[in-house]
Amino acid sequence: MKKILLVSIACSLLLAGCWDERLYKDITIVPLMGYDGEPGKWTGYFTHAVVANPDSISFSTVEGSGVSIEEARLDANRKTSESLDPTQVLVVLLSTKAVKTDLLETFDIAYRMPRTRLSSRFVVVEGDLAPFMEKTEKMGKEVPDYYDETLNTAIFASIIPDEDIQLAVRLLLDEGIDLQLPYVKMSETTGTPEVAGVALFSDKVFSGHTLDTKESTIIQILKKKPGDETMFTFEWEKEGKKYPVTVGLVKYNKKWNIKDSKINAAYKMKVQVNEFAYNHLDEEKKRKELEGFLSKELTNDFNEVIKKLQEAKSDPVGFGRTVRAFHPHLWKKGKWQDTFSELDINVKVDVEITRTGIIN
């Protein structure tokens, strides 16, 4: 009797289907989405796969509208022959207007639905969103793949942070650090979307401030989470002539000294010289001279970025986390974004050249 019961249970388990099973013949995959608007009036763009024949897959974009982002999808869904399935989305494009409201409230569904792909990425785009959903000849590939690969390249080059929507919600809920999202705009030369830096958030909304690619790279270093390749280029003037100098970050360490309402942040950076036509780096005097130049330039650049962060009342570096943990008197002064904007923050960068290139 026991054997019969066990066999019956085993068979029932084998016959049971997945609770969330969805057949591909009933749905169409949406790898790219875009949203524009404001609470109560949203427009959604959904790029979905179109299978003309087994050997050919193309993409088409359908538009919908509604009082919420989910209703916008449902509206677009009524305009397609198959159900739009966003569970495999790679990138979600957001207009600057769309992120001026609480991002967590707007995209509540992204974290409430169990089938949501948490490894997808939010991206803020400049201006009208519709052109960013269109394929151009110079992209060289389908739009969803273009964005996915472009973002991965920017992460590798330390231009933007490696943050998916799962990490984004953790940052939105953390009072000691602010969110930064990739900022994309249309290239004036190619007419294709390009990563232009990062969009800064203050608390849970877009601050209206952005940083360019060089400034956003500095943010990743300040945060101590740069990508695999981090480089800076300057012009070094010597003997009446300007020489470009490009250095790559090898490794570095940071030390923050926080006292009262003042933060002194010291960064020691070891770099390799990738480009320097003036040469003579085998001479210690010349090498020290170049190190001094790089230290001064980077110190100025780092402090300029800090000023922009304070103007935006945005702390993507995470100073607030350290203050909350070790300086409660400063943390309790009020809302962190307001306190951060008024702090006396000074950054000092010391550069050491450890690799001069094979020519030396």
Image: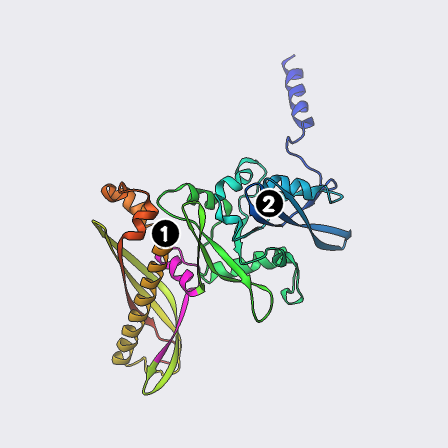
Q: Vertically, is 243 above or below 72? A: below
Q: Say which of 47 and 227 sits in front.
A: 47
Residue lying at 45% horizontally and 61% vertically, measured from the top left: 159
Residue 205 in magenta stretch? no
Q: Tell me the tag on residue 232.
A: none
Left or right of 90: which side holds 214? left
Left or right of 330: which side holds 58? right
Q: Where residue 217 sits in the image (x, y, percent)?
A: 41, 62
Q: Vertically, is 154 above or below 116? A: below
- Please state the extent of the stretch shown in magenta in the rendering: 214-236
Q: Where residue 84 sits in the image (x, y, percent)?
A: 68, 43
Assign a secondary structure to mark 1: loop
Extreme-left residue of the structure = 260
User: On the image, which quarter does residue 332 sit in?
Assistant: top left
Give the residue type that dot 2 points to.
Trp
Q: Tell me the tag on residue 313.
A: 1
Left or right of 99: which side holds 336? left
Give the residue type that dot 1 points to.
Lys
Residue carrying label 2:
42
Q: Say which of 197 and 251 sits in front.
A: 197
Q: Vertically, is 26 above or below 184? A: above
User: On the image, which quarter does residue 219 sit in?
Assistant: bottom left
Residue lying at 68% horizontally and 37% vertically, measured from the top left: 22
Q: Quadrant of the C terminus?
A: bottom left
Residue lying at 57% horizontally and 48% vertically, measured from the top left: 37
Q: Where residue 254 sits in the image (x, y, percent)?
A: 29, 57
Extreme-right residue of the structure = 53
Q: For residue 224, say whether it is visible.
A: no
Q: Say which of 81 and 27 sits in front.
A: 81
